[in-house]
Amino acid sequence: MNKVAFITGVTGQDGMYLTELLLAKGYTVHGLRRRSSLANTGRIDRIVEEVNRVEQRLHLHYGDLTDSTNLVRLVQAIQPDEIYNLAAMSHVHVSFDMPEYTANADGIGTLRLLEAIRLLGLTDKTKIYQASTSELYGLVQAVPQSETTPFYPRSPYAVAKLYGYWITVNYREAYGMYACNGILFNHESPVRGETFVTRKITRAVARIASGLQQTLELGNLSAQRDWGHARDYVEAMWRILQQNEPEDYVIATGQTTEVREFVRLAFAEAGIEVAFTGEGADELGHVVSCRRPEYQLPVGQLVVQVNPRYYRPTEVELLLGDPGKAQAKLGWTPASSLADLVKDMVVADLEETQRVADLRKLGYDVSLDLE
Ligand code: NDP
Ligand code: GDR
């Protein structure tokens, strides 16, 4: 019998990559989607169509992590072997504006799923993966950060995820459930949400190169993140649920990079060299050289500036993970380097921008969201 998985957050970045992975492994996949006034399944439409044309192995269900009865009913109907709880209000900055909702969805939402398993008597059958985060480390206590580094969350998002982390550990210890946390450091891809910093940068590089945008406005350029590729990280999620014993794991590359450096690398991928001058809110990025004459970017052109609007009330300055345990016990190492990731994202955004430019040339009024 093929295994059955239930993925919350199936319409998100990780949901897309994990769905592809599990389908390729022969699973039947059930995904939780939210009702929205506009379509929110863009990332997985192609997969739904391709898989279900051949055999009905991917099923989407309406629901929400804030709705217990809905979750209980779905878990009862699906009887999953594995649940991957990826759904969350996942934007750190936005969580300062929506702290209560974030606590409800990201914190109590995790409890609702664990309780559904317990109430339905599935504690021996259903394994559960909780999408924990390097944001738990917050204010730096030690680097590199490992499974034993103390937590110090710095946002309503991280505090909500701290509850999710500990309630997962508690249900494992109290009820003997196979419940695990993956403490994943930042992971990105061409389908990363457009307001996370990497995608915001690669989209802007493509648009600036094509003359569709003048400058890129960012917040804290000195923040350091351990960035990996989402495709590699969903493989780790799956491995975490295939062990003899349920445990928690850090998933990271072991390298950290400043936002400023990611900006340089992304422009360089498009053939544009950018240098920074000034400090703090006065820091600016200018074009030093451009290898692609068709971009019409003169030397000295301003392309990056700081807008304090993007600063956070409390910031996480440095994340650097120690993936030693995952390497030793899961046999997991990331396949993509940072250079591979940057290239993947910039190339995809250049292609997307080219499509927009072509449509505009044909007279279509295609709008651009410049967030
Ligand atoms: P995304 O923001 O891309 O996806 C989040 C998903 O959750 C979307 O499918 C979204 O639906 C869904 N969702 C949001 N709120 C609810 C809710 N109340 N009920 C049901 N579904 C909801 O996140 P990622 O794919 O990047 O991340 C996946 C998980 O991993 C998240 O929990 C995130 O916090 C965590 N994480 C992510 C890391 C990263 O670097 N990407 C690192 C560490 C942890 P919709 O499409 O309708 O918005
Ligand atoms: P993060 O990712 O907060 O680490 O959370 P994000 O890409 O939003 O920020 C990374 C760093 O870049 C700085 N930054 C900016 N960030 C955004 N979004 N926009 C800007 O304009 C900007 N300028 C500078 C930020 O201040 C921050 O230091 C992500 C999410 O996926 C979480 O769900 C996940 O848990 C963590 O990664 C691990």
Image: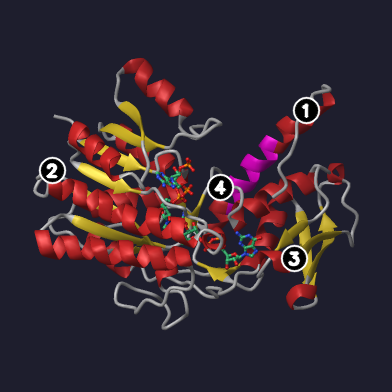
The 10 Å Cα crowd at callout 1, few under 14, some 14 to 19, many 20 or more, is few
Residue drawn at (89%, 59%) of the image: 299
Q: Which residues are magenta?
A: 342-352
Mark 2–mark 1 contact, CB under 8 Å?
no
Q: Which residue is mark 4?
A: 193
Instruction: Give, as a three-letter code, the residue at label 3.
Output: Asn
Instruction: Give, as a three-letter code, the residue at label 1.
Output: Asp
Q: Which residue is mark 3?
A: 307
Number of residue marks:
4
Of tags 2 and 3, the one toward the viewer is 2
x, y percent for residue 189: 52, 48
- Asked if disc 4 is less than 8 Å from ligand 1, the answer is yes
x, y percent for residue 159: 41, 68
Of tags 4 and 1, the one toward the viewer is 4
Foreground: 306 or 153? 153
- The reply to whether the magenta stretch includes residue 102 is no
Looking at the rendered structure, the secondary structure element under dot 1 is: helix
x, y percent for residue 45: 47, 27
